[in-house]
Image (cartoon, rainbow, N blue to C red):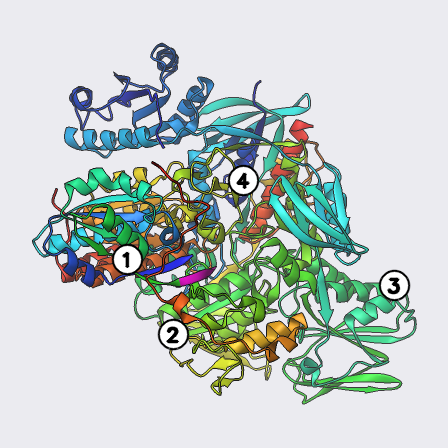
Amino acid sequence: MIVAEGKPVEKILEMVAPFKKVLIAGCRGCVTVCLTGGEKEVGILASQIRMARSKDGNPIEILEQTEERQCDAEYNAKFLENVEQVDAIVSLACGIGIQYLGEKYPATPIFPGVNTLMLGANIDVGKWEERCMACGDCVLDKTGGICPITRCSKSLLNGPCGGSQYGKCEVSTPAKEDIPCGWQLIYDRLSALGQLDKMKEIIPSKNWLRAKGPRTYVREDLTLDRS
Amino acid sequence: MTITNIRIGIYLCDCDGKVSKNVDLSKVKTAIQSQAEFEYIREADVVCGTAEQEKVAAEIDKYSLNRLLIVGCNDPFITRKFVQLAEEKGINRYSVEFLDLSAVNSVEAAVSAINSRLGKLHLREQIGYEELAVTPDVLVIGSGSEAAAVAKAISKNQPVVRIDHETKKVVGVDGFPGNFTVRLLENGKTSKHSFGAIVLALGAQPQYDAAKYGGVNLDERTLSLSQFINADKNYAGKKISFVLGKADADSLLSFAAVLKSSLDLKGKGASEVDVIYDDMKVCADGLEQEYELARKKGVNFLKYDGEFQINSASDGATFQYREPFLPIEATRVAADYLVLAEDFVPVAATQELAEILDIRTGPGGWFQKDNVHFLPIKSNRAYILFVGSCHGPIHGTDLYNEIEAVVAEVSAFAKGKAQVPSLQPRVEAKKCAVCLTCYRCCPHHAIEIVHGDEYDNMYNSAARMNPLACQRCGICAGECPGKAIQLPLYSDQEVLFEVKQPAKIVAYACENSGFLASEFAKTLDPQLQKALQIVEVPCSGKIDVIYLLKALENGADGVMLLVCHKENCKYVWGNNRAEQRKERAQALLNQVGLGDRIEFVHVAANQGNQFNAAVKEMAEKIRQSGTNPGKVVK
Amino acid sequence: MERKKVLVIGGGAAGMTSALDLAAQGVEVFLVEKEADIGGRAAEYCCKATDECNRCAACLVLQQKEKVAQEPLIQVLNNALIKEFKKNGKGYKATVAIGGQDLALEFQAVIVATGFDPYDLGRRSEFAYGLEKNVISGLELERALKEKGTLTAAFGPDVKKIGFIQCVGSRDLSIGHGYCSRVCCMYAAKLAKLIRSELPEVELDIFYMDFQSFGKGFGDFDKELRESDKVKFIRAIPSKIYGFPYDRLTVRFSDSLNGQQVEDKYDLIVLSLAITPAAGNGDLAQKLGINLDEYGFLAGSSDVESMATSQPGIYLAGVCQGPKDIPQTIGHAKAAAGMARNYIFS
């Protein structure tokens, strides 16, 4: 799932400063699941902005709408009636949704209400961890199912660096939780699987071009000729 | 969710002249008629009179009324009578509202109160009753005498299966009360069984701690209490001295066992029996009497204070101590056998079962949170119950009482069916992202994810609250990021309707604490609550961040959350969730410079003074922060 | 089908618990209360929470009271007394006197939940109870703290030393009370803790015989009480309290360390009065045909069986059967309700 965090409201207030009527658009996909951009957060942000603007003597009208996914044009079509009424849109979808909704309504300025952070797993309520960087060239088969690109701070492919100490990564700081060394995790898993010999296998340097954008992906077997 | 075909009947009762003293009811009626939506309205002198009741019954039929608003007094006697009448007519208690006008002084105030109540009645989800098929069979887990006793007692009413969790182990539990599916492992094979309820009766484990006896190790002559009891030897002609008080300080178990053993020894011809103790623990039925009996039978009771010394030899053991009531330095007791009390600790399987069953443990690792709402036998999950020493050492009549409480609880399923009002939250599948937040936040393990074509979203799935497991706290509704969950009687619409035109201070109050405290507080200082609006919620865990913001957006100057004391939430962690939400809401206000406007107060039902003090503090906070500049003028 | 009916005698914690449990099963309940309002003694107790709940459970009783008021299947009869009581087939019937009026009721089972009376010191004047205004009972302290909010609001700013005296009327064979009241040590300790959280400097002493502690986590509670809360435990029951000629209360007791008589000055003395059988127990037991135990509590049908009585369909709930704390009372009353339900539906 895509994990996002709410943008500081002062940034959003700056973005919408020139406008009198704004739509806050939520998404029922990943950002609802990661508790950042669903109907609940749309309501909270709307209320907060209304109050902030009232306080500044510059009232704003805010419409609220949340639809299935902002990364699909068909769902974005549902925003039409509201978009027509407003001066600008704040989207609480991920970066994809924000852009895609913007493309649907090119005449209306659109602003991000969230920072899109990562592809992560939901560890528990309110806790997420990155598990994939979408490098386009998966090596999980060689690393016991643990991604060195994401879990190693340096994205090393062939074992840890000298900064691996007691299973932790030297990047760990007292301020944040200890980061486990990705290669320690891989070693432990492979050892549990009885596949430690895989550690000896040299993973050739990656084709990072596959991780570089702008990327497109087309499946000829699925593309539809509508003519 | 839309509710169709609501037909409300309004009765404006004068309560024998009490209401019209202050308010002209015919004017109220005219005002309501001109603006509100309803099916039928009329005035009455005493609507609770027998003749009136018959008339109301006829009107319910004539106008096909399905909801009632009785305006007048709020006497429990009247409400009871009316609900009975309504229920006979097929309108259940959740569709009848009462409004007390006895303290209202103007037509405007009366109309506004009636409109507010009518609005809520319109927004209310229809609540019916569900009759559910349940399995009467009860699973009792435990190998000791407590488990045997509870299994025997339950078997008077319904089938019981008892397992020891050793040869036959619980490895998984799915489902809900009435229909738990338990996976059992025996001889390497697992099998599935259905149970309506689960009773944990694991007992407690005695554990000798040498450190409590100056490092003395157990040997031939110095025994632990459990060694002594299990050995069951013939001690005729011997002298036995029991030492109590150093271990097992939290229970009466050792005391009861020693008293019983002492009497036993006396009966079987022991030459002398001493009980050396510091505090005689007799606070259970029959213990004081047994203590008296033991004294009569010649058991020596010796009180010690502070330090002591134990010496064990091959032919006996000695206990040297200071007797608090004698002016001598040391007293020495020599015995053939010295028997030392032990601590009791939870049996090894406790933590494992707590995880499998998703039930909480408390201090000392015993089952059950140390929260008065769960005492004596309840867990955080409905129909998973504790009995006996597995949730803290217990014995005698107290054990019997617990067993009978368990029998009473599980016998609700004895007939194979259970009827419950469908008050559990509703999930609007279209808005459900199946994110599992509700599932994870539910303290009662009452939520499942269900699948099917009828669930109108991209996953064809939705969360569902089980009516027998759900305890209607509304924590899930407060957590849902998609606003898909609505708790009947307290939907977002209903709650936010109340704060559309809020008072200066809006206080969201848990019905178990803040609301009751406010009622008490009113009697202490009636003036103080004039600028205060109480919005009752079933648990503070239902108070959503948006509730706090909306009250302010709509014009309140301050918002309060009145919640139960720490470790006293009936729903485990509702009050903690409320505190976290308060923090977030205050941060949101700070970000936009709206100041300190939220007050979070732990208060209990009997703390009217503390309630009033908190209201004063809130008023002071507002005085300092000034009028809410964030109010949105519409 | 006509609903089954149960008579519950006593509207305190036990009676309300039984009534609510029965109503939840669709049984109609007559809840007969001799006072003007339900709630019982526990409804007058104060909250003993400090920075967290201290598990006194008094709040549960007020929650129940609210639920009873909202429960249409429970008919509360205040100021009511059982006047006559008779067998009626498998069930019973009774005449209940409410004010000047008699009400005839028929029902299939009975739950007796008449609670207790605090020990009446009567003519015993050694503690100057009733003579000195600052010698009060535990219940009076609870009530004062509930009504006034703080100890200072209730007793003024000059209280510097408070003594709790345990076992007043409990475990006292000289008056035939060969039992422990079970709850006093814990409530005295919790009240002491509550007062400490309000008044960091006040001296707090507890006079006791044997400290009756129980419950999960009590070890920690006890340690905190002695160490950080600085509550002093004195193993002695005072022999005499007198006010005159001083302006403080003088408490005379014998020091267990040296056997010497000691006198010390206090500003407030709280007596933990024993739980004793309710005054009307004898009369009620006779009407219902059930037994009393040796102390005058209502008796279960055997030594351990504490809910069923010698009469079919009549059950005991709560402290009327013997001393219990609030959670134990609630558990007991739930069990009694279950038995009554099984009886009327069998």
Q: CA distance from mark 4 to mark 3?
A: 42 Å
Q: Dot 1, how many residues are within 10 Å of its Cα: few (below 14), some (14-19), or many (20+)?
A: many
Q: Amino acid at mark 4?
A: Gly
Q: Residue at x 33, y 12 (%)?
A: B63
Asked if labels 2 and 1 touch by Cβ distance under 8 angstroms, the answer is: no
Is there one chain holding both mark 1 and mark 2? no
Q: Quarter holding the C terminus of chain A?
A: top left
Give C342 or C252, whichever is nearer the viewer.
C342
Q: Mark 4 highlights which residue?
A: C15
Q: Mark 1 highlights which residue?
A: B585
Q: Position of residue B200 (x, y in %)?
A: 67, 53
Q: Is residue B359 magenta?
A: no
Q: Which numbered marker is on residue B47?
A: none
| Quarter of the image where one finds residue B322 | bottom right
Q: Mark 2 highlights which residue?
A: C202
Q: Chain of mark 2?
A: C
- Asked if residue B530 shows in the view, the reply is yes
Q: Amino acid at mark 2?
A: Val
Q: CA distance from mark 2 to mark 4?
A: 38 Å
Q: Is residue C111 left or right of residue B106?
A: right
Asked if labels 3 and 1 touch by Cβ distance under 8 angstroms, the answer is: no
Give A190 or B424, whichever is nearer the viewer.
A190
Task: Classify mark 2: helix, strand or loop.
Answer: loop
Q: CA distance from mark 4 to mark 1?
A: 42 Å
Q: Residue at x 77, y 59 (%)?
A: B166
Task: Classify mark 4: helix, strand or loop.
Answer: helix
Q: Chain of mark 3?
A: B
Highlighted magenta segment, given as a residue range: A119-123
